Image: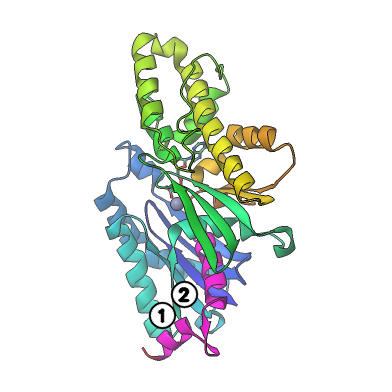
Amino acid sequence: MLILSIESSCDETAVALIENGIRVIADITYSQVPIHATTGGVVPEVASREHIVKIIPCIRNLLEDNNISIEDIEAIAVTSRPGLIGALLIGVETAKALAYAWSKPLIPVYHIWGHIYSVYLDRDIADIHLPAIVLTVSGGHNDIYYFKNHNHLQNIGKTLDDAAGEAFDKVAKMLGLPYPGGPYISQLANEGEAFRHDFPQPMLDSGDYNFSFSGLKTAVKYAIQKVDIEKEKAHIAASFQEAICQTLAKKVIQAAKTYNVQSIFVVGGVSANDRLRDIINEHTHNNYSVLYPAQKKYCVDNACMIGSVAYFQYKNTVVEGENIFSIAAQSN
Ligand code: KG4
Ligand code: ZN
């Protein structure tokens, strides 16, 4: 089953062709990062306007460059929430118009589930074992899910304030690094000592799977005020990265133990962080199967993951012999 998928929830205009939820036939991601870097963060109005300009050319190129005709496509998937409302609307309205014009089922996708299913891309399904505990860590979200099966995906923890990626971005700004800060902190941290500053690892004893990074951010802010920032920059980056990654790793492993699962998925922009991967590895001692997106480009926002979750949702929404999304398409 070939799905055309669209993602426009934040600052990437992304489209993809995904077969059976796993195989990426083709994908295009137009990133607005260089534009938003000039203002140090995403300006929603600017993001919406960029999506308007790029979305149709992206879809046209995707189909033409890969010789895909309208008949080859079985359904259209689109991120419907959460995200910037103006940005989401561009993707959703485009998908609705195409689904109507081409008489295809339209599958709305919850963006965070997209990140969760990003582990299915380019993988053999036999290598993915459920139930799993999933850590979703990006700029906009920071959750833990219990993924029992395709019909049971339960949120068991979330951030009470900033998401991990947001904390990376804000600390990067304090250190005078460009946007988005995660990759820059990670690079700078390679030159610093991870235990030079004893930053807090918040909420490890909270008895739940929630996170809070505002105290950690404040600790970094005070540390910066006390030192010669140019000399200490790399140590602060390394110590901050250590504190946040230790917290994420310990919490997700606590959840895996409590829910008695053997699989852990780590997804979202921050899952590209090498130190986070090393720490998880150090703590799990090969007792768990830990899966990350197969390619780093699937960690950050992309349309491939939207096509993946859409396929599995589609397959699991058959009511009285017919798929509810197909019924909706027929009644157009
Ligand atoms: O998943 P994503 O593209 O967007 C959201 O859905 O939010 O994630 C973007 C976030 C940014 O905050 C960025 O700084 C962070 O992921 N990020 C990283 C790394 N690469 C991207 N954070 C830490 N280390 C990285 N290597
Ligand atoms: Zn995302």
Q: Residue at x 58, y 23 (%)?
A: 190
Of residues 162 and 160, the one drawn nearer to the viewer in this rendering: 160
- Give the Cα distance between marks 1 and 2: 6 Å
Mark 2 — residue? 76
Of residues 97 and 330, the one drawn nearer to the viewer in this rendering: 330
Number of on-image labels:
2
Horizontal arrangement in the rendering, residue 328 relative to residue 267 (left or right): left
Q: Please state which amino acid type lies under the numbered disc 2.
A: Ile
Mark 1 — residue? 99
- Does the residue at mark 1 contact the one at mark 2 (Cβ under 8 Å)? yes
> Local crowd at mark 1 within 10 Å, few (<14), some, or many (≥20)?
some
* Label 2 SS: strand
**Residue 53, horizontal then vertical, whole percent:** 33, 61
Query: Residue extending furthest left?
Result: 45
Q: Residue at x 60, y 32 (%)?
A: 275
Looking at the image, can residue 177 be seen? Answer: no
**Stretch of the chain drawn in magenta:** 302-330
Q: Please state which amino acid type lies under the numbered disc 1.
A: Ala
- First in sequence, mark 1 or 2: give its number: 2
Could you tell me which quadrant the C terminus lies in? bottom left
Q: Residue 75 has which mark?
A: none
